[in-house]
Amino acid sequence: MRECFPFQQGFLGGTSARLGISLASDTFIEIDHVTFGYDASRTILDDISLKFQRGKVTAILGGSGCGKTTLMRLIGGVHAADKGRVIFDGEVVDTRDQDQLYRLRRRLGMLFQFGALFTDLTVFENVAFPMREHTTLPEPMIRDLVLMKLNAVGLRGAAGLRISEVSGGMARRIALARAIALDPELIMYDEPFAGLDLISMGVAAKLIRTLNDITGATSLVVSHDVPECMAISDHVVLLATQGRIVAQGTPAELMASNDPETRQFVRGEPDGPVKFHYPAPKIATDFGLTA
Ligand SMILES: Nc1ncnc2c1ncn2[C@@H]1O[C@H](COP(=O)(O)OP(=O)(O)OP(=O)(O)O)[C@@H](O)[C@H]1O
Ligand SMILES: [Mg+2]
């Protein structure tokens, strides 16, 4: 499979990191005391600090609504932090600086939570889209690159299909081929396993790990699929509401943890320090069974 990856040679904008001559810091993304709310009435992330290591797969695990997608939007410069800084390979992300945003996003591949493929275009056209938008490569070269990216996700044979003709699992892999179209240095995956059957899930998980290792990219996976993330990540962050960090470490460290909240998290127990029930009066009181 190795020969399938032109970006191995830094074909499109390679970096010293990919050649193994990393002069830069080991941290690729730093979240430095970030606080953020979509409006003043509610804080979504409250003074959160995290570091994502260059060349590693980091998983952020957390329940629905804890702010995982929001964190990715902050890294991509879609929203600005109310307080604190997001640092992208040593540069503070400034959402007012359009030139910087364009440059940073060119280095970033994103697998969106809800697919975001162009349904009227073919599989081929979807993967070619970012290449046509961001490069002046001649058409025969784009063709070869698209087929290589599709080959990497096992779908070269599906190049001519329309998106409406592919399954959900295939769509996820096409989105992945598009996310890596420009040889990104950072790949962010938002819920890459949601809605996939077990086999497709295993395929997606293996692909994330393989792409990370072959390209030397830094990968960030947000998900609530604990076993899949534990299997492919170098580092795992457990997130609770308002971006509170419950624990972080290697998968083995978290699995061995004696902390009750961490145990509940990684074992998927329905009740524990994080309660299944929203705070409520005693059930007997609600049903009028007590005096
Ligand atoms: N564009 C928006 N405007 C206002 N509130 C938003 C917006 N996007 C998300 N939120 C709110 O911010 C909180 C965090 O949302 P976010 O999408 O980051 O959660 P998540 O951890 O990705 O959840 P899920 O696992 O369900 O995808 C939620 O309460 C959500 O309702
Ligand atoms: Mg989300």
Image: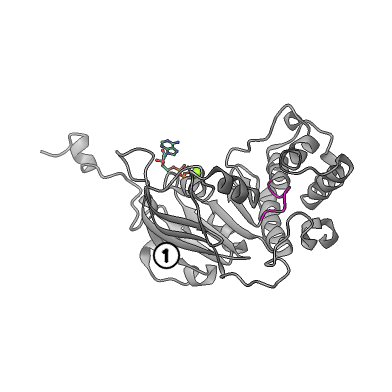
Position in image of residue 87 (x %, y %): 50, 58
Looking at the image, in which quadrant does ligand 1 appear? top left
Q: Is residue 180 magenta?
A: yes
- Seen from the viewer's position, the closer of residues 243 and 196 is 243
What residue did someone put label 1 on?
247
**Tag 1 secondary structure:** strand
- Quadrant location of the N terminus? bottom right
Position in image of residue 202 (x %, y %): 68, 54
Three-letter amino acid code at the position of disc 1: Ala
Position in image of residue 285 (x %, y %): 18, 39
Q: Residue at x 70, y 29 (%)?
A: 119
Q: Is residue 127 above or below residue 34?
A: above
Predominant SS of the magenta segment: loop
Q: Tell me: 287 left or right of 192.
A: left
- The answer to whether residue 190 of the structure is visible from this angle is no
Q: Tell me: 208 left or right of 82.
A: right
- Seen from the viewer's position, the closer of residues 134 and 165 is 134
Color encoding of the figure: one colour
- Seen from the viewer's position, the closer of residues 270 and 166 is 166
Q: Is residue 157 above or below residue 219?
A: above
Query: Would you say the beta carbon of the disc 1 residue lies within 8 angstroms of ligand 1?
Result: no
Which stretch is magenta? 179-184
Q: Is residue 41 magenta?
A: no
